[in-house]
Image (spheres, grey):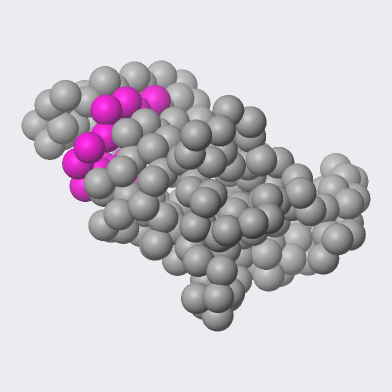
Amino acid sequence: MMLFGKIYQQLCGLQKLPWSCDSRHFWGWLNAVFNKVDYDRIRDVGPDRAASEWLLRCGATVRYHGQERWQKDYNNLPTGPLHKYKIQAIDATNSCIMSIGFDYMEGLEHVEKITLCKCHYIEDDCLQRLSQLEKLQKSLLEMEIISCGNITDKGIIALCNLRNLRYLLLTDLPGVKENKKENLVQVFKTALPSLELKLNLK
């Protein structure tokens, strides 16, 4: 485990090499392995620690409640009482998180902000799953979705279930057509009247 972070960084460097069909299958398989949910681990160490391990394993970062520093290094995850570190913010920029891993989020009670930027495996079913998580429906205040090409208006509309959401940024989402913009605005205005919605879909 101590070498995991360095090994992962080296593997990520290999992704910059020219792709072939075989390499795409390999990276798809590897990312699926990183996202596989270990329910025993969740039970043993708690949802926040298990989710932290999953997110950092996939290249995301987390910030804990009461801390300013972002946790980026898998090998330097904090030790000590497991209940002490509660995830407050998630930045999944350039990460490989995908829907099969979202069960890790089910027990998170303190997440206030999520950023999904250039997440190639994020699709509508991910947003639908996220919006159904009762604890996130209560805690999540801010969300940013940027340059995620597989997201459509179907997935965006599901976010209306995040009833305490106060800020939503949607930008560079080619899967959401410009003619759907007005409908999105009206849906969110009705469902979440206090939401600050910023759209730049092009």
Quarter of the image for the N terminus: give it.
bottom right
Residue, far front: 81
Q: Considering depth in this image, is 157 or 136 the residue closer to the camera?
A: 136
Q: Is residue 109 left or right of residue 97?
A: left
Q: Is residue 162 visible?
A: yes
Expressed as whole percent of the image width and height from the top left, the position of residue 172 reads: 49, 26
Q: Quadrant of residue 72?
A: top right
For the point 53% across and 41% down, the residue is: 64
Q: Which residues are magenta?
A: 154-169
Using the image, determine if residue 154 lies above or below residue 21.
above
For the point 39% across and 25% down, the residue is: 169
Expressed as whole percent of the image width and height from the top left, the position of residue 85 reads: 54, 49
Q: Is residue 183 left or right of residue 153?
A: left
Q: Considering depth in this image, is 21 or 6 the residue closer to the camera?
A: 6
Expressed as whole percent of the image width and height from the top left, the position of residue 38 reads: 58, 75
For the point 75% across and 60% down, the residue is: 27
Using the image, determine if residue 197 lies above or below residue 165.
above
Using the image, determine if residue 39 lies above or below residue 109.
below
Expressed as whole percent of the image width and height from the top left, the position of residue 155 reads: 34, 47
Taking the magenta stretch, the answer to whether it contains residue 161 is yes
For the point 33% across and 40% down, the residue is: 140
Taking the magenta stretch, the answer to whether it contains residue 88 is no
Q: Considering depth in this image, is 200 or 76 the residue closer to the camera?
A: 76
Q: Is residue 158 visible?
A: no
